[in-house]
Amino acid sequence: MNVLEKQCPKLPFTFVMNQVIKNILVMHKGKNSHPARSLFFVPVVLLVLASCNHLNNNHKKDKAMEKPKEMSTFVIEREIKHIGSSTAQELKEGSKKSNAVLNELGPDIEWDHSYVVDNKLYCIYKARDESLIKEHARKVGVPANSISKVSAIIDPNTAE
């Protein structure tokens, strides 16, 4: 932190300028010197305050531009008896419930897709961390028997 950053006022610009002008007028009250001569320093004060404002705004921008924690991809195994024989309507209702909970949990968790097999559901999610996946499962009322973070994705093109 440099000297200017330490001395930058955290007060509104107009308040500071009013105080500077009042102090100049008070300093010259009853003296032979004309206050307008001291107004020569106002541009200097303005320059310092503008620099302070610039530093304060950059600090706010830096905080606002902080990268959110990246999301990882997870494979979730859910053991659900006879899920493979569910009707399209049953799968639709389950998906609606899942989506409602995802909306409630916010942008740090996303459902990509799921594979439905005989007695299991394999779900692909992106999430900030595993705890969000567990919370989602609890709120939806489905198990999360196994949660594995994906370390790499391969496909036939990986061999090339």
Image: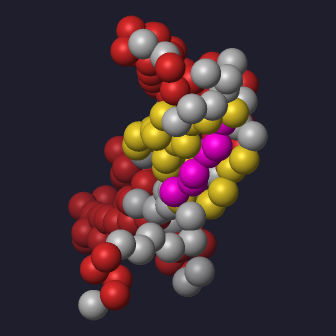
In the displayed structure, 82 sits above or below 77; it is above
Q: Which residues are magenta?
A: 73-78
Q: Is residue 76 magenta?
A: yes
Indicate the position of residue 130 as horizontal and vertical percent values.
Answer: 68, 49
Q: Is residue 118 left or right of residue 37?
A: right
- Counting labels gives 0
In the displayed structure, 8 sits above or below 87; it is below
Q: Is residue 72 left or right of residue 25?
A: right
- Residue at image x 56%, y 64%? 150
Q: Nearer the viewer, residue 140 or 116?
A: 116
Indicate the position of residue 95 as horizontal and vertical percent values.
Answer: 45, 21
Indicate the position of residue 100 as horizontal and vertical percent values.
Answer: 48, 17
Residue 70 visible in the current orientation: yes
Indicate the position of residue 106 as horizontal and vertical percent values.
Answer: 50, 32
Tell me the chief SS of the magenta region.
strand
In the displayed structure, 119 sits above or below 11; it is above
- Residue at image x 52%, y 26%? 84
Q: Nearer the viewer, residue 48 or 105?
A: 105
Residue 49 visible in the current orientation: no
Q: Is residue 104 left or right of residue 148?
A: left
**Screen quadrant of the N terminus:** bottom right
- Residue at image x 37%, y 50%? 13
- Residue at image x 50%, y 20%? 85
Find residue 79 and report its image quarter.
top right
